[in-house]
């Protein structure tokens, strides 16, 4: 695995554990020689992740739509910054550059990006691993909802098994590297 795309919030959230998880994840990926693709932000959990990767001497490629350059305060010190026109182009390029996807806590954009990658996996548009970093149970309500959708007959258990979940960065990275 050469690179993993990390979806993360442009905010830091209220718990210091979210920032620590982003930092530890950045170091864990670099320790294994895995580069990072992300949304290019220099703020929020995105910025914490990028700084950790840079501190570890790793590669980090940011992809950002031109409209968000100012809003997300693009990180100026990353290995490579790619500016695209739209969010659709952003996600497509991030998916193209990455061999897998990890999601840190985040908001609507983070959730949307993650669900799209799981959907693409379900439909066979890629065969790359997807993982949720469930820091302090952050994704427990989402996982409960997804179990509810299975119970109500809208998705199968096979669909729920498409992605990995772990509460520790090191554990999730290991799951991502283990063939399913």
Image (cartoon, rainbow, N blue to C red):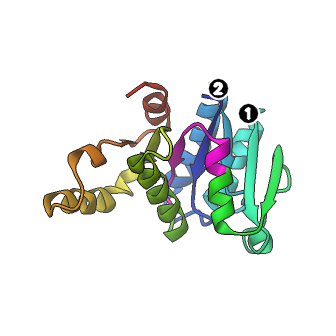
Work out whether residue 30 or residue 18 is closer to the camera in this orientation and state it.
30
* Any part of residue 77 in sight: yes
Residue 119 in picture, x, y percent from top left: 42, 55
Q: Which dot marks residue 31? A: 2
Q: Is residue 100 magenta?
A: yes
Is the residue under label 1 in contact with that under label 2 (CB below 8 Å)?
yes
**Few, some or many C-alpha atoms within 10 Å of disc 1 (few <14, some 14-19, many ≥20)?**
some
Residue that numbered label 1 is attached to? 56
Residue 110 in picture, x, y percent from top left: 53, 62
Q: Earlier in the sequence, mark 2 or mark 1?
A: 2
Residue 161 in picture, x, y percent from top left: 30, 42
Above or below, 121 against 173 in this view is below
Tell me the quarter of the picture where residue 29 sits.
top right
Q: Secondary structure at mark 1?
A: loop
Residue at position x 73%, y 56% from top? 63
Residue at position x 65%, y 30% from top? 2
Q: From the viewer's perspective, is 146 left or right of 15?
A: left
Q: Which residues are magenta?
A: 94-105
Tell me the quarter of the picture where residue 73 sits.
bottom right
């Amino acid at each position: 695995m050469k690179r993993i795309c990390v979806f993360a919030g442009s905010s830091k959230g209220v718990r210091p554990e979210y920032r620590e998880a982003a930092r530890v994840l950045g170091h864990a990926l670099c320790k294994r020689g895995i580069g990072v693709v992300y949304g290019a932000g220099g703020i929020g959990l995105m910025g914490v992740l990028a700084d950790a990767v840079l501190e570890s001497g790793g590669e980090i490629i940011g992809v950002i739509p031109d409209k968000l350059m100012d809003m997300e305060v693009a990180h100026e010190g990353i290995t490579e910054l790619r500016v695209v026109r739209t969010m659709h182009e952003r996600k497509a390029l991030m998916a193209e550059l990455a061999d897998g996807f990890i999601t840190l806590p985040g908001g609507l954009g983070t959730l949307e990006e993650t669900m799209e990658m799981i959907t693409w996996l379900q439909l066979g548009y890629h065969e790359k691993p997807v993982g949720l970093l469930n820091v302090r149970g952050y994704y427990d309500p989402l996982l409960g909802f997804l179990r509810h959708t299975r119970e109500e007959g809208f998705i199968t258990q096979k669909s729920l098994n498409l992605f990995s979940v772990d509460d520790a960065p090191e554990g999730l990275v290991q799951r991502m590297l283990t063939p399913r």
